[in-house]
Every structure is written in structure tokens, then in C-alpha cells.
Image: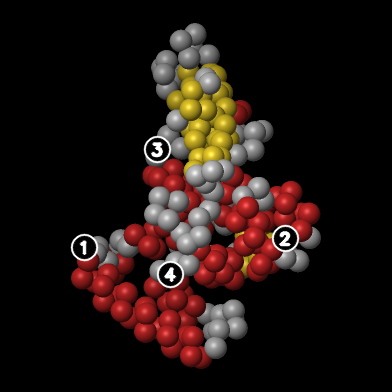
Amino acid sequence: DTKIIEQKISDPLGREFWATYFLHQRKVEWKEFVTNFYEFLQIELPKSFYESLEEDEEYDFNDNNEEEEEEEEEKEKEEEEEENENDGASEEEGQFDDRTRLFLCLKAMLVDSNIHNHLSSSSDEVEFVHISDFGKILGWFGPLDVPYQYGGIFEQIQEALTLECFHGKLSSDDATKLLSGEETGSYLMRFSNNSPNSFCLSIVNNQNKIQHIVIPKQINKDSNTCYFTINSRSY
């Protein structure tokens, strides 16, 4: 089991997380995954998540005892009051608060098959997170920090999903089809399907040919930060 985790997840803290909570599992239910993931990162889940749990009577909230649930409810009430004071938008008005939006973006990457529908309502079917998908997401948007630091995986995923040029897991063939007939300089960004932990820039070059440029992601182990390399230049 540990060998599988090492094969599927390159991020050290990602490996630690999966081994701690799901050592003998290759896929886990989304609700169980996200509850433990937020706990591991030492951050609070959005209130909308707890509201959805209240509607699901069959869900076992990870063996939390009654005292912990009461404490969590008190925290949620306090946070709700703060959010009502500080946030101009409310979910009742058809908008998402920042915490919920980050939550939904993470879910889009790990669960939804079409990442462009990242703000769609969840289905009634049981949703799972696979260890391989978790490892890929960490490869693209990691590394993890514990406790979680602003600007980490959540904000990076949200930023990617809000870019019009970002097309996620689009294949090179489909990228070529989308760019065919477009003017010089037209481009799109996507995940590289052949190079782990890398993105790919598909662009119409000066010869009106579609070029696919792999953008490798590198990790600075000393500072636990990442950078990208394009034409031998780092960013």
C-alpha cells in the first residue's frame, strides 16, 4: 500500500495525508476525503458543507463525538456572524463566499469530469476521489503546506479555473482542433498529458502551425515553493 502511495503521489505531505487517513484505499468518498483533508491542513470547511451534511442523514461524520460537533457548531455560528459582517455577497443572493468558492474549485478538480462546470450543483450519486487524481492535482498545484498558507493549492486551482484560456485535461488533438483557423498568437493552456507535473501551452506560431510547448514545474525543496521553466528561463 505504501508503494502505491509513493507511485501515485510525489508530494511528501500528500503522501503523509493519504497514508494517515486512507492507507488501504485507492479511492474514497468525496465527503470523507474533504473532511480529513481540511483537518490535515488545519483549516475550516465552509458552512455550506455542514449544511449539506445535515440534509444527508446517512452520512457518518467521521466518528466525531457529540462534544466535538457542538464545538464545531459554535465555531460555525461565530464564523457565520463574521462572514455576514465582512462579506458583501451572500449565498441567498445566488453568490458564493470565498471559502465556498475555493471548496467547489477543489471539488471540480478532484471529482467533476468536466472542470468547466466547476460551480454546478453536486449530483445525488456518491462521488469519489481517486489516489491518482489526488496525486496529479498536487503535482500541478502543490506543494502542500501544513498549516495551510494563503496562496497555496486552493487559490492556485481557483485562479486556473477562472482563466478563459485554461482548458484543463484537454488532449493535444482537441487543442489542435480548437486552434485550427485561429490567427497567429492564439493560444490556450492545459495540463500536459504526457509530462507529469507539467502544463502545456498550445499556440498558433508565426508559421500558422499549432505548437505544443510543455511547461515543466519544478519544486525548490529548500523553500517548498514551485517555479516553471520555459526555454531555459525560470518563472
Name the residue rendered at 60%, 56% in the picture. 13
Which of marks 2 and 3 precedes in the sequence? Answer: 2
Q: Residue type at mark 4?
A: Glu
Which of marks 1 and 3 precedes in the sequence? Answer: 1
Q: Quadrant of residue 211?
A: top right
- Across and down, in percent, residue 120 comes to 44, 58
| Position of residue 215 in the picture relative to residue 50 (left or right) | right
- Label 4 sits on a secondary structure element that is loop
Q: Look at the picture and state if 67 lies above or below 54.
A: below
- Label 1 sits on a secondary structure element that is loop
| Position of residue 231 in the picture relative to residue 88 (left or right) | right
Disc 2 crowd rating (10 Å Cα; few below 14, some 14-19, many 20+) is: some
> Can residue 230 be seen?
yes
Asked whether 231 or 81 is in front, the reply is 231
- Across and down, in percent, residue 57 comes to 54, 84
- Coloration mode: secondary structure
CB under 8 Å between discs 1 and 2: no
Name the residue rendered at 49%, 23% in the picture. 233
Q: Which residue is mark 4?
A: 44
Name the residue rendered at 57%, 32% in the picture. 216
Which of marks 2 and 1 precedes in the sequence? Answer: 2
Name the residue rendered at 60%, 39% in the picture. 197
- Label 2 sits on a secondary structure element that is loop
Q: Residue type at mark 2?
A: Arg
> Can residue 201 be seen?
no
Disc 4 crowd rating (10 Å Cα; few below 14, some 14-19, many 20+) is: some
Asked whether 118 or 25 is in front, the reply is 25
Q: Which residue is mark 3?
A: 164
Q: Which residue is mark 1?
A: 88
Which of marks 4 and 1 precedes in the sequence? Answer: 4
Q: Residue type at mark 1?
A: Gly
Q: Which residue is mark 2?
A: 26
